[in-house]
Image (tube, coloured by chain):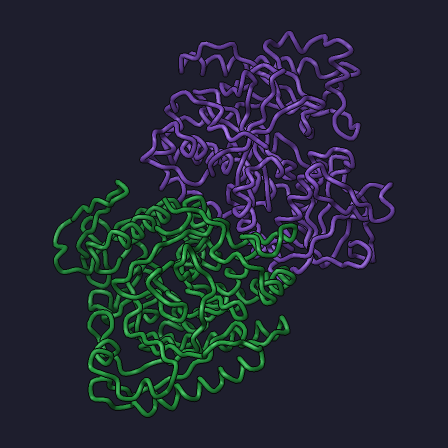
Chain colours: A purple, B green
Amino acid sequence: MVPHLKTALTGPLQDLEKRFLDNSTTIEQWFRAQWREHVPPFYGSVDLRNSGYKLAPVDTNLFPGGFNNLNADFLPLCVQAAQSAIERICPNAASILLIPENHTRNMFYLQNVARLASILGHTGLRVRIGSLLPEITEPTPIELPNGDSLLLEPLVRRGKRLGVEGADPCAILLNNDLSAGVPEILKGLEGQWVIPPLHAGWATRRKSQHFAAYDFVAGKFADMLGIDPWLINPYFATCGEINFHERTGEECLASQVDGLLTRIRKKYAEYGVDEKPFVIVKADAGTYGMGVMTVHDAADVVGLNRRQRNKMSVIKEGLQVSEVIIQEGVSTVETVSGGVAEPVVYMIDHYVVGGFYRVNSDRGRDENLNAPGMHFEPLAFQSPCSMPDCKQPPDSPPNRFYAYGVIGRLALLAASVEIEQTAPAQVQEAGATA
Amino acid sequence: MVPHLKTALTGPLQDLEKRFLDNSTTIEQWFRAQWREHVPPFYGSVDLRNSGYKLAPVDTNLFPGGFNNLNADFLPLCVQAAQSAIERICPNAASILLIPENHTRNMFYLQNVARLASILGHTGLRVRIGSLLPEITEPTPIELPNGDSLLLEPLVRRGKRLGVEGADPCAILLNNDLSAGVPEILKGLEGQWVIPPLHAGWATRRKSQHFAAYDFVAGKFADMLGIDPWLINPYFATCGEINFHERTGEECLASQVDGLLTRIRKKYAEYGVDEKPFVIVKADAGTYGMGVMTVHDAADVVGLNRRQRNKMSVIKEGLQVSEVIIQEGVSTVETVSGGVAEPVVYMIDHYVVGGFYRVNSDRGRDENLNAPGMHFEPLAFQSPCSMPDCKQPPDSPPNRFYAYGVIGRLALLAASVEIEQTAPAQVQEAGATA
């Protein structure tokens, strides 16, 4: 179904990636030590940009929705990693409730849910899928394009426990990012593990907190390898009081954009990068590629027209944007049959379990590829990310993907730190049990 | 290189295997609970026999020597499982010393060592290979048929630590089964992990202890599934005072053989098995398929001729046999191009990471296939053992291999119990550190 192209980028491997390869033993040791200090999230996916001179994460998703895009050959890796996660988080769980996003017609997403359910089932959990949608009032089977089917069931709250009719699961796995806030039915649960914890949802999560944690983690990693952290870390800044409709906060935005562009320009000069710097302005709590804008000049954010302001002000679930993150733009040099390609790395526990390219032929190399309504072709990674091979040329797929797996895990580690730092007091004490 | 046949057995799946499939969630939960009680060995391989009506382990190896025979596509599973094992056993190890068997010309075995070294390297360990062979007095590179090379180095003992020139490793992984006893150079080490612990070597290990532990484990498993434990467990008995040269202990052997054959005959009658029962007589501490005999009648073990007595009395490293195990013979119904085939399941930590068929065209279906000097063709499993698929027919490869993975893990669990039970007092206190 998905063509197994070698990699979207066939040019020679850059210095940075070569550095990772040469130091893979040290890097793996370093990660091993980090995971003793920080608890990995149950799962996560990281969007990367590879500009040739720079390889950096641009978004980290703690409720990944594209397991269906992974190479099916690597599913055993998912099962093994999920076993390991379950053993760590809820070893005596016999059943799990999977709560997906509120989509009933997005077949791509529903195939992701089916695959997740299958992975969980193989670890020895009875899986039920409980929907937050009010219109799901009875068990509703959904036929998937690949012939599988999925049973969405209405959630049933009994006292401080959540389940579906006839099932009182030990654990709840969220594949819903809680953009609309934490639903009442999920609040105040006791004696059930909620994975990831509620505060990892977009109701409380902020991109800027994540990238602050990434700053810290990438700094330590760069130190250890003796490299400039900028090579793996996009600059960022925030503005906290924006109202695009009322045009307040424009000056803050313009000045932050200008500041970032100046810093990037300096780095471009230092590394001889002959490109026009740009930044991406995004909703700090946003997701789904909504509320995202590419900006080349501070003047561009002053006096936005109505269409631009509308676009920026509303994100998923109709929420208003008031905080934004301004992130250094990292262009991508990867293309697949003329379309711009962005690698997405998938992880379960602290293991890289696969990845795919998001290929979008309608977009430029300095634009966001995960845009609503935009068509993208997933192209599964051909090789796993855990097996660099020093006997193969440095630009062979296992070696290229290894570098992606390193940066993906670095962003996942940042997410661990972020979740620790943002945990409400009682969660910090009680661990993952809600 | 290795043809990826679907499975050696293409007939319909038997009742027992179907029972495993139907209960896979319960089985996985049961294993999860068991691994909380018992520490899995670092690695292991299990030889299975599938007679159609019965699926049972016949040998469990705690120093597996055929990693080179596994499907290379599943190597990422090995790396992930080894990461997990290292995190559990010696999380802060940065380097490891691999001690192989004393072979310098067995290229099949040396390719196994190379593959093991590569797996360990990918987990983030610096790997050195230290040889126990006295003739290895300086670093000795060995070219392998696949173009790889291996560096065997002389072991260097410094006080209570063992290493090689220029390296003081954190951990020592034995791929040597210690048939010749525990070498002085391995005794009294301090501050280094020795994996598996020394008492898991054949210097102290007994097949009968393993199968006693398997009896216990298989009994619990059969109870949980509501099946007759005989369906997964070969009967066995022992004789402790045999001297094949001096012809002492023959009566004990004959009477045990007779007793076992009687018990097997009863079970055959119960299940309507129309076969001639047989037993396998093996050295209780033996390995490498040496000192093994197929017996159909108690009279066969009385008055053995000189050749037979010689064959039975000496095992690996020239050791004398005095204790034997008499094990119910399980014939194999699996064949590959006319040769008799026996599945071998490979595990790292508690994860099944692959397997292969040992195919031997010179041997009968009631004979030992792992015989010295015998040619066998490895045939790698095409699918992993962790992904049964209820949507595929029950005899499809993932489903057949799942059953093999279940019995393989059951034998590995028995090995955990065995290692606990046979641990010397100080090891029981100090854990895995030697």
Q: In this view, does B229 lie above or below B196?
A: below
| Quadrant where the N terminus of chain A is found in the figure | top right
Q: In this view, does B296 lie to the left or right of A64?
A: left
Vertical order, B388 against A294 (above or below): below
Left or right: residue B34 versus residue B378 is right
Q: State left or right for residue B350 relative to residue A254.
A: left
- Seen from the viewer's position, the closer of residues B216 and A248 is B216
Residue A85 location (% of width, % of height):
57, 51
Vertical arrangement, residue A42 with respect to residue B157, above or below: above
Q: Is residue A197 visible?
A: yes
Residue that appears at 40% across and 62% down: B340
Q: Which residue lies at the image location 60% right of the left edge and 17% below the top edge?
A: A361
Near-viewer residue (B320 or A113): B320
Q: Along the horizontal axis of the image, is B220 left or right of B182? A: right
Q: Position of residue A305 (x, y in %)?
A: 75, 8
Asked whether the viewer can see residue A240, the reply is no
Determine the image quadrant of residue A300.
Answer: top right
Of residues B99 and A273, the one nearer the viewer is B99
Q: Which residue is drawn at 79% across and 16% down?
A: A245
**x, y percent for residue B390:** 64, 53
**What count of labels does the image hold?**
0
Q: Name the residue furthest bottom.
A: B251
Q: Where is residue A302 in the image (x, y as percent from the top left)?
A: 69, 9
